[in-house]
Amino acid sequence: MPHAVIEYSRDLERNFDAAALMLAVHQSLLDSGEFGEKDIKVRLYPCDHALVAGAAQAFVHTTIYLLSGRNKAVKKAITLGLLEILAGLDFEAASISVDARDLDREVYSKITG
């Protein structure tokens, strides 16, 4: 844990390094001190169609799914740290946002291999 799910408008791909984006998100989460390197999962999904404020605009949105139990101050520090990293990647005219969501620790299940 965590799972970082990055959605972005496909029009960003012309000046876009997917591997660098995923590594930057991974490193930001690792640097938070909340997670071990092997626990961090990052996924990237392009969106072909999107509106921001009623108009076509580039965007990057990351949702971080965390096991429940962290307080709001910790979650806010994680999202702000990630937002700073994403802003530094200079997405041209893009709306950039980050959110953190809790997964219920009592019901989350997984198999590792």
Image (cartoon, rainbow, N blue to C red):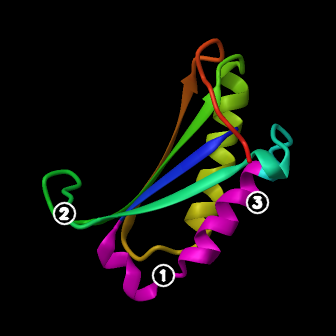
Q: Which sits in the foreground, 59 or 1?
A: 1
Instruction: Specify the farthest residue to the top.
Output: 106
The amino acid type found where label 3 is placed reads Gln
Q: Earlier in the sequence, mark 3 or mark 2?
A: 3
The amino acid type found where label 1 is placed reads Phe
Q: Which residues are magenta?
A: 9-29
Q: Helix, strand, or loop for circle 3?
A: helix
Circle number at residue 49:
2
Q: Is residue 38 magenta?
A: no
Circle number at residue 27:
3
Compared to residue 21, the image places residue 7 above or below, namely above
Circle number at residue 16:
1
In which quadrant is the N terminus drawn? top right
Image position of 84 (left or right of 99) = right
Image position of 43 (left or right of 12) = right
Q: Where is residue 10 drawn, in percent x and y?
A: 32, 73
| Residue displayed at 65% across by 51% down | 41
